[in-house]
Image (cartoon, rainbow, N blue to C red):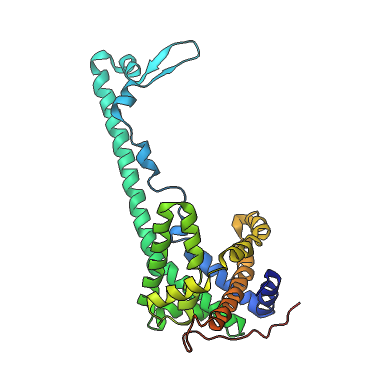
């Protein structure tokens, strides 16, 4: 039905001339905004839980010097402040370390909550708007101002809710095992593209269209994404990964071509009804 070469050829055509450089500007803006959300979080927020010191273990922990001398926290303080004050000193250290890790954990939890809210109310709407830009750019009508359409056309709350439910569904399936979460992420791959073009569609209908249309397409999409791996490795080797700003337009334009192809499939299989989504045939030169 479609080939990677065909989609990439159309993507290159959609990025010809000045349209590529506008896409680079958009990618740069989105990359900056994305750093504010969950995508920039490194590590596991709850990892410090394992670092909270167990008082008994810390007090009784022992180490051995090269000469065979055995040391413990208590023995060190016995040497420094005397045996009578050693227990109090150990307890003070334990309390201080425990407070430090507790505060550290609370700070990370607060950061996680803030990043989640930013992802939900700021980053996700911008990601949806980015898709609209690339849809328009495919027809030589993409403008940087397309990035604010999620906030200006009266569909903001719908977009926030739909993207939240997509992330929630994928997250819940990921709790079972990693593989089910990955499969669901591909089932709902089209959701941000569908609501970019028609945010008035009911939430259940958006997920229904994406799920039915992606049937039999998940593995092919995975291989399409994998085909960019070489470019991604090269981009990651650039200064602070700056190369991704120049690579992203090519990838996004290719995914838009995939989306347009999926709309044709959905139309042919009567998955979408008339007027739900605009279905057009690309006139881009191929080869």
Relative to the observer, which residue lies in front, 69 or 78?
A: 69
Relative to the observer, which residue lies in front, 178 or 31?
A: 178
The residue located at (40%, 63%) in the rendering is 169
Quadrant, the N terminus: bottom right
The residue located at (32%, 34%) in the rendering is 97
Residue 260 lies in quadrant: bottom right
The residue located at (34%, 49%) in the rendering is 107
Residue 187 in the image: x percent, y percent?
Answer: 49, 67
Quadrant, the C terminus: bottom right
Kindly give the residue lying farthest to the bottom in the view shown.
275
Question: Compared with residue 55, is residue 79 higher up or lower down, i.e. above or below?
Answer: above
Question: Compared with residue 45, is residue 6 higher up or lower down, i.e. above or below?
Answer: below
Residue 74 in the image: x percent, y percent?
Answer: 32, 19
Q: Evaluate whether residue 221 shows in this view.
A: yes
The residue located at (38%, 41%) in the rendering is 48
Kindly give the residue lying farthest to the right in the view shown.
287
Q: Evaluate whether residue 192 shows in this view.
A: no
Marks counted in the figure total: 0
Residue 130 in the image: x percent, y percent?
Answer: 52, 74
Question: Compared with residue 143, is residue 183 higher up or lower down, i.e. above or below?
Answer: above
- Left or right? Give the position of 6 relative to 209: right
Residue 28 lies in quadrant: bottom right
Residue 17 in the image: x percent, y percent?
Answer: 69, 79
Relative to the observer, which residue lies in front, 252 or 279?
A: 279
């Amino acid at each position: 039905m479609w080939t990677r070469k065909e989609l990439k050829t159309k993507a290159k055509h959609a990025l010809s001339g000045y349209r590529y450089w506008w896409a680079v500007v958009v990618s740069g803006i989105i990359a900056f905004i994305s750093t504010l959300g969950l995508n920039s979080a490194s590590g596991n927020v709850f990892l410090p839980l394992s670092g909270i010191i167990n008082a008994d273990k810390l007090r009784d922990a022992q180490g051995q010097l090269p000469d065979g001398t055995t040391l413990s926290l208590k023995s060190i303080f016995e040497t420094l402040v005397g045996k009578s004050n050693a227990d109090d000193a150990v307890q003070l250290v334990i309390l201080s370390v425990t407070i430090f890790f507790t505060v550290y954990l609370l700070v990370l939890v607060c950061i996680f909550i803030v990043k989640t809210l930013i992802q939900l109310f700021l980053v996700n709407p911008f990601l949806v708007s980015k898709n609209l830009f690339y849809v328009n750019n495919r027809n030589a009508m993409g403008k940087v101002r397309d990035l604010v359409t999620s906030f200006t056309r009266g569909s903001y709350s719908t977009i926030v809710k739909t993207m939240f439910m997509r992330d929630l569904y994928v997250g819940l399936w990921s709790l079972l095992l990693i593989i089910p979460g990955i499969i669901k992420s591909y089932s709902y791959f089209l959701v941000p593209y569908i609501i970019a073009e028609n945010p008035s569609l009911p939430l259940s209908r958006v997920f229904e269209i994406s799920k039915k249309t992606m049937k039999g397409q998940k593995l092919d999409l995975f291989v399409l994404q994998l085909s960019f791996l070489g470019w991604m490795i090269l981009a990651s080797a650039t200064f602070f990964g700056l190369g991704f700003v120049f690579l992203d337009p090519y990838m996004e334009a290719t995914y838009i071509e995939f989306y347009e192809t999926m709309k044709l499939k959905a139309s042919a299989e009567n998955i979408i009804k008339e007027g739900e989504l605009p279905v057009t045939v690309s006139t881009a030169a191929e080869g």
